[in-house]
Image (spheres, rainbow, N blue to C red):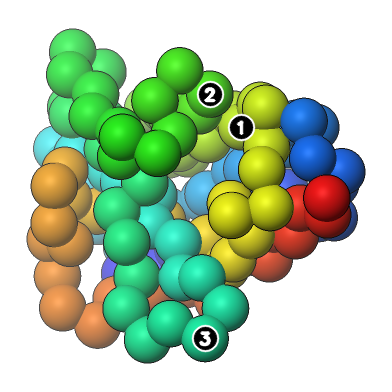
Amino acid sequence: VQFVESGGGTVQSGGSLRLSCAASGFTFIDYAMSWYRQAPGKEERELVAGIHINSDLTNYADSVKGRFTISRDDAENKVFLQMSGLKPEDTGVYYCTAGYSKPRWIGYWGQGTQVTVSS
């Protein structure tokens, strides 16, 4: 099982970024996928957004509702996170994994992609 995140960067407050995650080592279409983030100085990752199989259900943290959109491409085994209206509190390392409201497997994380939002 492998996750490779990309697309992070440094943007000003109000800016946008699109994160991508390439997944491999499992049957992608059979699993919900999600994005987590780890804020600076915090040990735990928080759930940002999840997408069910067939994209028929999505869920978002209250702090990102209306600003972030999760999507998936089952043909490419990829999941995306479109982020707009970025705020400094969105700063952190973003990770994708399998699972909808909690990680499907313990300990399976990619290297993450850094998002920094300056005020």
The kind of residue on which mark 1 rests is Met
| Mark 1 and mark 2 residues within 8 Å of each other at the beta carbon | yes
Q: Which of 43 and 8 is in front in this view?
A: 43
Which secondary structure, mark 3? loop
In the image, taking residue 55 as reference, residue 40 lies left or right, namely: right
38 shown above or below 55: below
The kind of residue on which mark 3 rests is Gly
- Tag 3 or tag 2, which sits nearer the N-term? 3
In the image, taking residue 114 as reference, residue 30 lies left or right, namely: left
Residue under the point 64% across and 60% down: 91
Report the disc number at residue 67: 2
Spatial distance from mark 1 to mark 2, Cα to Cα?
6 Å
- Label 2 CA crowd tier, 10 Å (few <14, some 14–19, many 20+): few
- Tag 3 or tag 1, which sits nearer the N-term? 3
Residue 79: give x, y in percent of width and height: 45, 37
90 shown above or below 64: below
Which residue is disc 1 drawn over? Answer: 83
- Label 3 CA crowd tier, 10 Å (few <14, some 14–19, many 20+): few
Q: Nearer the viewer, residue 109 or 30?
A: 109
Residue under the point 80% across and 32% down: 15
Report the disc number at residue 41: 3
